[in-house]
Amino acid sequence: MVSGVRPIIARPTPSANAIEALGDIDPLHARLFAMRGLTAPHELDYGLANLAPIGALENIDRAAELVIAKRNEKIIVIGDFDVDGATSTALVLRCLREFGFEDVDYLVPNRFEYGYGLTPEIVQVAAERSPSLLITVDNGVSSVAGVATANALGIPVLVTDHHLPGEELPDAAVILNPNLADSHFPSRYLAGVGVAFYLMARVGRLLQEQGVEGAAKVPARYLDLVALGTVADVVPLDHNNRILVHQGLLRIRAGHSVVGIQAILRQSGRQAARCVSTDLGFAVGPRINAAGRLEDISVGIECLLTDDFDTALGYAHTLDAINSERRDIETTMREQAFAYVDALGSQRWPACVSVYDSSWHQGVVGLIAARVRERCHRPVIAFARENDKYLKGSARSIQGVHIRDLLEAVSATRPGLIEKFGGHAMAAGLTIAESGFEEFKKAAAEQMARLYPQADFSGAILTDGNLPGDALNLHFARSLRDAGPWGSGFPEPMWSGDFSVVEQRVVGENHLKLRVRPAGGGSTVDAIAFNQAGPAYRGTVQLAFRLDVNEYRGNETPQLVVEQIASLQGSGT
């Protein structure tokens, strides 16, 4: 192989017994599921009856009773400025209003004015509306000072969150979080919107028992919001999350989703009737996220709250325009970040890469951390200026490295270096003094090397092996699409194999369109390699690819979506 390409590693082949244990299904599908850790047929049953029991989430009865006790008073939902926060906010507002709660509103802190979570400042803003209860969604478990401020003002706080707690918990009336230290809930990977859904489901059941007709059925009508938030937050798709996403996708495909999701899908050129998890992750999610990154997430929330399609379509166009601006900003920042790490040279990349430029936009640093991680194949923390004194950082990790634990180690060994931090295994946020950036950069790399001496920095592509040539067809491509939902922790099948290049051309700005034939013989098939245009390939190449369904003018064909293309020795380019 040409040097510089990422190594390709096949997943361990499951035993025949492991495949047979999944029951009477297609052997190739059974092999894929067994390779992802599934051990029994019920793990492929995505009916709602298989959800982890609502009552199994600790504190949920206390939380639901608190909400119901305030049904005739003012409740304010405190959201977060990403898709998980936006969907959580929309879900709770829609459910409470359908339950008959008449005075429900929301407040999402602008990241540039108030920062993340239930801060003392945002509590003061909420207090001006005289609420009787604050409900946090997708935040709050680290808001010790904010909850204390609310308590001092006589406003009880119900915290619903999924982020890992710190050493000190806020003194909230109730905390609902599957990641509390004493939790035994069987699905700790719930997104914030998943926690909010469980709360609303419990509220609905209790209200139904109290005589509110149909209340128990209300939350399930918004599983489309749960699916969107779960996919966009890139939480692992364990069985419980796959059920939530699958059920939400069914609603979207049937035309029963909120009109905001339908409008964004249409605006982005996707068909709701064929919606899959990647449409949520790469079309709907980024457009809503862009509003929170650059301006105010409220436009995204309003898009998810309206029941008028034309209004939603107007919001969708606004979100698309903001997203285009975000892409332009990201392009400039990405080029600057790449120039920095390329100038260092791969041999000098530290175990944890920290990048910062005083001109960078703080709402986009999370994307830059992700892009640099893809280039360096190691944890990356990107910073931008929050104000004249502090930097706001966003961290993205690699498999096997718990980024929040890494930040905790830095904080423990260098007290005061990190002002505050929070997050989970693969992503985290933090604040440091600008004057401490160089010290932090060094400390993060040192702790990474100490905690994870065996970390894999190769960027290896994990595949499901070779796909037989006779499986490169539309029927099998459709079956893979329908076998999901695929996502974090339950990755879409990736294959590798050798192919002869029959045709190739550059499309768009930097995409390579190919027609290839399996090296062992067979029919030709289309392939697309995004952002991989370059010298022409000749002879035989090795591809790492996903098998997808391409639709053009109503005609469906199989297509290889190429993760990596590399010339075999002697083939030349």
Image (cartoon, helix red, strand yellow):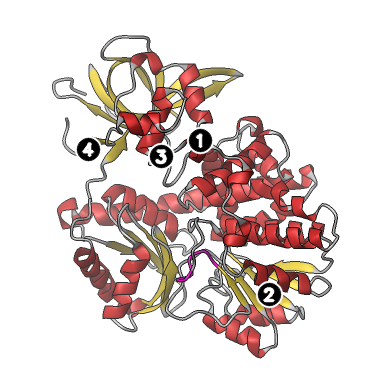
Mark 4 and mark 1: Cα distance apart in space: 26 Å
Task: Tell me: 364 left or right of 37.
Answer: right
Q: Residue at x 26, y 45 (%)?
A: 459
- Whether residue 257 is situated above or below residue 411 in the rendered picture: above
The three-letter code of the residue at mark 4 reads Pro
Looking at the rendered structure, the secondary structure element under dot 4 is loop
User: What distance separates the C-alpha of mark 3 from that of mark 1?
Assistant: 16 Å
Measured from the top left, where is residue 557 in percent x and y? 50, 18
- Mark 2 vs mark 1, CA separation in Å: 37 Å
Image quadrant assignment for residue 290: bottom right
C-beta proximity under 8 Å, tags 4 and 3: no
Q: Are marks 4 and 1 in contact (CB under 8 Å)?
A: no
**Lower position in the chain sequence, tag 3 or tag 1:** 3
Does dot 1 land on a helix, a strand or a loop? loop
On screen, residue 208 versus residue 573, left or right, reads right
Q: Which residues are magenta?
A: 177-182
- Distance between mark 4 and mark 3 Cα atoms: 29 Å
Q: Which residue is mark 4?
A: 7
Front disc: 2 or 4 = 2
Whether the magenta-drawn stretch holds residue 180 is answered as yes
Residue 149 visible: yes
Which secondary structure lies at badge 2? strand
**Amino acid at the residue labelled 2:** Leu
Q: In the image, which is nearer the foreground, mark 4 or mark 1?
A: 1
The disc placed on residue 39 is 3
CB atoms of marks 2 and 4 within 8 Å: no
Report which residue position mark 2 lands on.
134
Residue 415: image quadrant is bottom left
- The label nearer to you, 4 versus 3, is 3
